[in-house]
Image (spheres, rainbow, N blue to C red):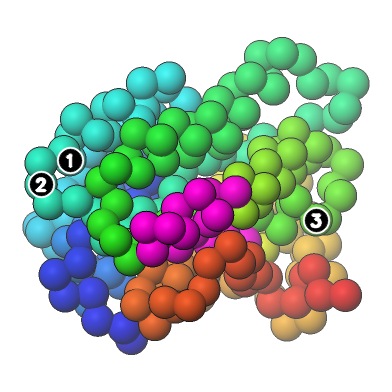
Amino acid sequence: MATFSGKRILITGGTSGIGLAGARKLAEAGAQVILTGRNLQKLEECRRLLPGSVRLIQNDSADPETGKQLLEAIRGDGGLDGLWLNAGYADIAPVDQVDSTFFDRMMNANVRGPVLQLAALSGELKPGASVVVTSSTSTYEGAAMASVYAATKGALVSLCRCWASALAGRGVRVNTLIPGAIATPFRDFMSEDVRSNFEAEVVGRTALQRIGTPDEAAAVALFLLSDESSYVTGAQYVVDGGLTMV
């Protein structure tokens, strides 16, 4: 595994799943990790799960002040070697049941949040820093009930390509992590029956015939955050066991 000794990495939305797995791996590799989460109880659980050197910040990606709050929390501490914009959530609805509240809430958390966070924190990125943004294979799957969620994750893919161009002059790289079905609490909003049926259907379409683990997705994020990916920018790294393979 790449060394992150002396590197300072901020992960948004890292209190569970892929983000938490990545925070643990980064801390083990010597990074100074800053982890954000919306839920105070989950942050306290992370305090028990992660090394004491990991810094925890309560921050809601849907808050219009999310970027300013993060900048105030870290400014003056030496800049960032890596920024992993991972915060977001999923929900589903038939197309005829999508209303403005449903739409705005998900767009605010999944799209506006990362935009404002990068806008505020871009000045803290050191030359040669790496930005990773978590999207989803939902962008490409065409799932009937996931139109708004898929749109938010598709927007991130487009944003990352623009950000890669905008920050290239400073040597800052921007890449997209695109997980498929990963064993995380991300689908806990579904009932147990719906979730089981969904996962069985996805596994049936996945070449490797299984759900992925958070560690498997986090390992790819760490590659993108590391100096080993120094010539990679504007790229999309799919971690889906062959789900979207064509």
Q: Residue at x 48, y 77 (%)?
A: 231
Distance between the Cα atoms at labels 3 and 1? 35 Å
- Above or below, comparing residue 96 to residue 89 in the picture: above
- Magenta stretch: give its range: 162-178
Label 2 CA crowd tier, 10 Å (few <14, some 14–19, many 20+): few
Q: Residue at x 45, y 53 (%)?
A: 167
**Pointers 2 and 3 in contact (C-beta within 8 Å):** no
Mark 3: secondary structure: helix
Q: Which of marks 2 and 3 is in front?
A: 2
Amino acid type, callout 3: Tyr
Let me know if residue 148 appears in the view: yes
User: Pointer 3: what residue?
Assistant: 140
> Which of 20/190 is in front?
20
**Pointers 2 and 1 in contact (C-beta within 8 Å):** yes
Residue 74 disc label: 1
Let me know if residue 48 appears in the view: no
Task: Name the outermost residue toward the bottom.
Answer: 1
- Above or below, comparing residue 124 to residue 25 in the picture: above
Give residue 154's position: percent from left, percent from top. 71, 46
Mark 1: secondary structure: helix
Relative horizontal placement of residue 116, taking residue 108 as reference (left or right): left
> Which of 205/110 is in front?
110
User: Pointer 2: what residue?
Assistant: 77
Amino acid type, callout 1: Ile
Amino acid type, callout 2: Asp
Relative horizontal placement of residue 172, taking residue 100 as reference (left or right): left
Task: Name the outermost residue toward the front.
Answer: 169
- Above or below, comparing residue 110 to residue 186 in the picture: above
